């Protein structure tokens, strides 16, 4: 094998699920990966973005991609969703075309079948919702679509799922994972960056610019992104997982079950993130909802970056007002970096990566015990706690976030603990990285 061949990166095969809205694509996707990663709702239009996860069957790994319902003619948003589907199919090794056995062939099914025949991709036709023997027999009706013998499954109940997956892996190449290959999206070891914010502030536009392709559907209608979308991106500093989350509104305004699950998934993305980017629409200013989101991220314990999007649209006086509101309403994260950008034009976006990398490095940082105790001793010498209380010994017991345990002879006042935290932060230049201090009395 030549040196050139050895340097080529091995890619896992990609299996894409397509079909008209509400045939069960997301239910099947969730069954294959073994968790409720995609939102499932018994009505069309819930899935809008491509949703990709690594799956495995019979020891064969492959990417499985859930897509929105393909609509050949519809609204502007329908067109954007359809383009996402078409982009996914172009990159696929195998396409699963899902139809509804309980409904039969529709005009939309025939249009999709014609498009897939023209595309030249390898297609497996599957009739979903075949929950019993009678429904299984109805699959033969779909032979007229010209895509070969249809399979029948029930994504909801798992009926015939194993047989169908056997056929799926038989149609795709088997690729062994190299020992030096980065872990897949969502695995340990790859830093996760969550983009959070209110609806319609430009998160998906920024996400698409960061990952370098139109990965999330962008449309000027609140609530376009339903799921938290993960994308692994190789950077100069190593791989990063960017997570585009649904816009989060007040709970009192979440009156839709799909939107509720979007909110739950966005909160989970925050809890699992190494860094959160709070995207704020500068033309609207800092709102009470932005403040609550910042509080939620602060509680999660990961570093936060404040991104003021659409900054170029503001006049000088408006900019000063936004900066004043930022200092007043988000005072509790006043160490957080603030970046002023335009996600639409790309202005200022290049400044994000070095700031992100620095925040990630600080979040995982470990300080030698000797250095920690030196800083604590100097802080106590400058300002004793009073009442005979003092720190006898200190150690960093964990990272993610950096967590320090202080062994004391008696209880320390809370203001003094905050003073010691500030001393550690300044001495080791932790910046906006959250720090945790645990206090243990000698003998406890």
Image (tube, helix red, strand yellow):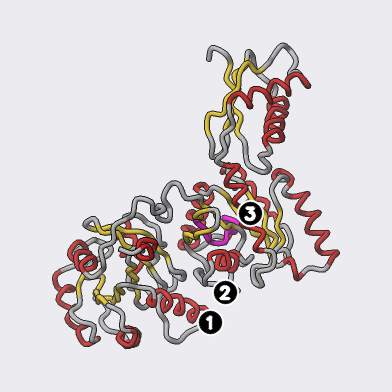
Q: Residue at x 75, y 53 (%)?
A: 326
From the viewer's perspective, is residue 384 above or below residue 419?
A: above
Between disc 1 and disc 3, the foreground one is 3
The magenta segment: 241-252
* Residue where numbered disc 2 is placed: 219
Q: Do the residues labelled 1 and 2 touch (CB within 8 Å)?
A: yes
- Residue 279 spot, x, y in % from top left: 64, 59
- Residue 76 spot, x, y in % from top left: 53, 82
Residue sitting nearer the eye, 158 or 1: 1
Q: Distance between the residues labelled 1 and 3?
A: 36 Å
Q: Can you tell which quarter of the image residue 11 is in?
A: bottom left
Q: Which residue is drawn at 64% across and 68% down?
A: 343
Q: How far apart are marks 1 and 2 (CA)?
A: 8 Å
Which residue sits furthest front?
2
Q: For residue 76, which numbered disc appears in the image?
A: 1
* Apparent side of residue 389 relative to residue 116 in the rendered image (left or right): right
* Apparent side of residue 8 relative to residue 241 in the rendered image (left or right): left
| Sooner in the amino-acid sequence: mark 2 or mark 3 | 2
* Residue where numbered disc 3 is placed: 354
- Residue 64 spot, x, y in % from top left: 34, 64
| Sooner in the amino-acid sequence: mark 1 or mark 2 | 1
Q: Can you tell which quarter of the image residue 438 is in?
A: top right
């Amino acid at each position: 094998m030549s040196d050139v061949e050895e340097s080529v990166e091995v890619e896992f095969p990609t299996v894409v699920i397509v079909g008209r809205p509400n045939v069960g694509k997301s239910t099947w996707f969730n069954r294959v990966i073994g968790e409720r990663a995609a939102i499932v709702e018994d009505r069309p239009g819930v899935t809008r973005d491509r949703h990709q996860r690594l799956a495995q069957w019979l020891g064969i790994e492959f990417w499985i991609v859930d897509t929105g319902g393909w609509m050949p003619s519809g609204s502007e948003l329908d067109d954007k969703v359809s383009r996402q589907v078409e982009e996914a199919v172009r990159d696929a090794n195998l396409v699963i075309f899902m139809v509804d056995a309980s409904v039969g062939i529709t005009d939309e099914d025939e249009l999709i079948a014609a498009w897939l025949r023209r595309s030249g991709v390898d297609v497996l036709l599957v009739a979903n919702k075949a929950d019993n023997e009678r429904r299984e027999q109805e699959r033969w009706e779909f032979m007229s679509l010209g895509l070969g013998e249809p399979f029948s499954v029930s994504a909801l109940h798992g009926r015939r799922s194993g047989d169908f997956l056997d056929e799926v892996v038989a149609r795709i190449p088997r690729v062994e994972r190299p020992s030096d290959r980065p872990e897949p999206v969502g695995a340990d070891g790859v830093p996760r960056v969550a983009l959070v914010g209110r609806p319609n502030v430009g998160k998906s536009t920024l996400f698409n610019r960061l990952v370098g392709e139109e990965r999330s559907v962008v449309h000027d209608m609140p609530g376009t992104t339903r799921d938290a979308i993960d994308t692994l991106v190789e950077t100069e500093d190593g791989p990063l997982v960017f997570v585009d989350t649904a816009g989060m509104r007040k709970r009192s305004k979440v009156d839709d079950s799909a939107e509720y699950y979007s909110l739950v998934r966005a909160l989970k993305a925050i809890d699992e993130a190494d860094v959160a980017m709070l995207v704020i629409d500068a033309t609207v200013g800092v709102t009470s909802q932005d403040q609550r989101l910042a509080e939620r991220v602060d509680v999660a314990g990961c570093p936060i970056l404040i991104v003021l999007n659409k900054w170029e649209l503001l006049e000088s006086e408006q900019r000063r007002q936004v900066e004043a509101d930022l200092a007043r309403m988000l005072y509790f994260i006043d160490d957080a970096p603030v970046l002023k950008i335009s996600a639409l034009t790309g202005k200022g976006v290049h400044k994000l990566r070095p700031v992100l990398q620095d925040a990630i490095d600080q979040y995982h940082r470990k300080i030698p015990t000797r250095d920690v105790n030196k800083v604590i001793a100097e802080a106590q010498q400058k300002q004793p706690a009073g009442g005979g209380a003092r720190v006898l010994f200190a150690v960093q017991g964990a990272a993610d976030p950096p967590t320090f345990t202080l062994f004391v002879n008696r209880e320390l006042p809370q203001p003094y603990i905050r003073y010691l935290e500030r001393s550690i932060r300044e001495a080791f230049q932790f910046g906006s990285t959250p720090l945790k201090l645990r206090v243990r009395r000698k003998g406890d």
